[in-house]
Image: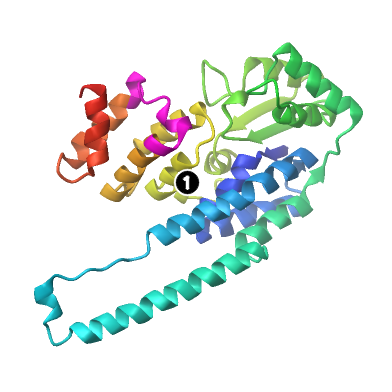
Amino acid sequence: MKVFFDANILISLFRLSNEDVVAFQKLVSGAKVGSFKILATPQLTDEFERLREKAVSDGLSTFSKEKASVSFPPFARAHPKFAEVKSLLSLAFQKLDDFTATIREEAQDRDLFVDDVISDLFDAATMIFETEQIVAAAQLRSAKGNPPGKRKDTIGDAVHWESLLSQADVGDHLCLISSDGDFYSELDKSKPKDFLVVDWLKETKHGKLETFRTISSFLAAHAPEIEIGSENSAEYLVMELENSESFQRTHDVLERLRSATGLTVEHVNRIIVAFEENPNVGRIQQEREVQDFIGDLFEGFGATSVGSCLHDLLDDWGG
């Protein structure tokens, strides 16, 4: 079995819990001992490098926003223990600032644990180097409008696909893990586009092509002994929504948020802010299923518990 992790999946590791990154490390170890083969391309390393800095910055920004801010009413300030509490809070905030600076420095130096795991993945991978034939085939694919690919001015996904086809052997089984909607069928969004299946079968005869939107869904199918839980948590999915880079990705995340665990009022308000600040989220807010989702949030958390931005959004829709 051959496995290809798209850049959006590798970047998502920065939003997983430490326990889940450890679990992913076990998967990489399996590739090292030959349980399966991980494939990579120079295009993948380029995409990862382009996205990593923003992923780390966004994570640190979220961390800073969530730093505790405590205010006291005047009558509490007169309490004998107020000075002690204020001093302890000041010390805690200084420790938090120091810790944030340490994390930022380690991120810049690529000393984070998740960086080590991703480096191990690339070390374990079989690199498919680009050739003139691969690039030319990708350009032709894009010019003809054949999948995968979002826009004709970029051919990254096409380069990935032509690279994978160039290394296909008879009977090969390929698992492609990507949150990119370009690889998925319009009829069944868990399966690959028919066009890509035909491509793969032309090269592999009796081979097999599978697609997975998340690491956890791939593991459930092929390594159930390894579990990754945080991909279904509210915190992870809200961060995915805040950083969504396509309408299809937004739809996918909103659908998964319906059954997310641990959704809080804070998460709801961050979801609404994402509608206001991320165009890949906000531009689909008039779609019926999106409005239904927001309406369900409003009903589930109550009119008084959520921020005014949700009320404003519903007012814009006439709700």
* 230 displayed left or right of 273: right
- x 33%, y 47%: residue: 267
Can residue 274 be seen here?
Answer: yes
Q: Magenta segment, which residues?
A: 276-290
Find the residue positioned furthest to the left. Answer: 75
**Vertical placement of 241 versus 319: above or below?**
below
* Image position, residue 240 (x, y; %): 47, 42
| Residue designated by label 1 | 231
Q: Is residue 96 magenta?
A: no
* Image position, residue 139 (x, y; %): 79, 21
Q: Secondary structure at mark 1?
A: helix
- x 81%, y 29%: residue: 168
Foreground pick, 133 / 255? 133
Q: Is residue 277 magenta?
A: yes
**Vertical placement of 54 versus 67: above or below?**
above
- x 43%, y 61%: residue: 64
Specify the quadrant of the image occupied by residue 123. Answer: bottom right
